[in-house]
Amino acid sequence: MVAVVELSEGPGVGAAYAKAALGVLRRGGTTLPDVELVHRGVTVARTHLARYDRVCGLRLTDTLPATYPHILAFPLAMRLMSAADFPLPMIGLVHVTNRITVHRPIDAGERLDLTVRAVDLREHPRGRQFDMLAVASVGGDEVWRGVSTYLRKEAAPRHAAGSAPRAELAPAPVTPEPASSGAAVWRLPARTGTDYAAVSGDRNPIHTTRLGAKLFGFPRPIAHGMWTKARCLAALEGRLPAAYTVEVAFKQPILLPSTVRFTSAPTTTGRDFAVASKRPHLTGSITAG
């Protein structure tokens, strides 16, 4: 049975990162905690929304961008992942895919009830992965849903003679780079990571410091995947339906500073889009309804 934990205020992200650093050597468990965190009556500060819109290249409106509820729910996800009973160390988790469903436009003046829980811990050819499920509701009606899939890379276990090897699961379906009906070149400054960290609360050092990036094998900081997704939706403003699902796969990281190419094209069900340079960084699709 799921244990529901009601929070009277949003948990601090900084404290979660500190706990995660202490738990980096945590031994892996086999089950996710059966806990759902709930934060009711969440309000949006329009000044913060405007800062977020500017950082992500979005228009300044009172309608929440599809990616904005993600940052409202992010502190809850951080609290779950940094807890002592979480089976995977949070430091080193890789955000591999993200799917958001907008059931209807959300006005900045609406009060949101947020719920977050981790589900479906499963094996992957490169380790183990799970989904972080976040839901935003207004008056008991779900208006937004986000599913972030995280991967923990692990060495494949050795198998005794005659035992079955780890199942080689097919990777999640990925949208190829579209035959573009529209393209743009984005020049991303070095401050892209720190600017987004300041407005999103996601201060993972791989995005904000050269030292933090080098500790995880990157020569310099990398862009947040959710910033890239938000920037893609900004490029498509005016062509998005009122209700839709937008799904992306995060490919190779974008080193900062960098110059990348955005492409998009309509499909029979919506639109495909991608961000690439000499290698793919993100592929995505939008489906109406």
Image (cartoon, rainbow, N blue to C red):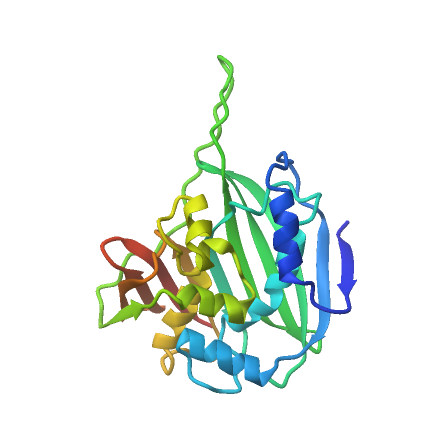
Residue 135 in view here: yes
Residue at point 62%, 56% (across, down): 78
Q: Position of residue 236 (x, y in %)?
A: 35, 76
The one nearer the camera, 274 or 56, is 56
- How many labels, in total? 0
Vertical order, 120 against 261 (above or below): above
103 in relation to 229, above or below = below
Q: Residue farthest to the front?
A: 211
Q: Is residue 266 visible?
A: no
Q: Residue furthest top?
A: 161
Q: Classify residue 286 by image quadrant.
A: bottom left
Residue 53, horizontal then vertical, whole percent: 46, 79
- Please tell me which residue is depicted at 41% across the width and 47% down the height of the picture: 214
Q: Nearer the viewer, residue 207 or 63?
A: 207
Tell me which residue sits at (43%, 60%) in the image.
Answer: 225
Relative placement, left or right, of 188 versus 16 is left
Q: Is residue 11 shown left or right of residue 88?
A: right
Could you say where residue 142 lies in the image, as x and y percent from the top left? Answer: 63, 71
Horizontal side of residue 42 vs 58, given as left or right: right
In this view, the residue in front, 176 or 281, is 281
Q: Splitting the image into 4 quarters, where does residue 223 fall?
A: bottom left
Query: In the figure, residue 70 lies in which quadrant?
Result: bottom right
Q: Give how far across and how far down residue 194 sits, in percent.
A: 46, 65
Left or right of 30 in this view: 237: left
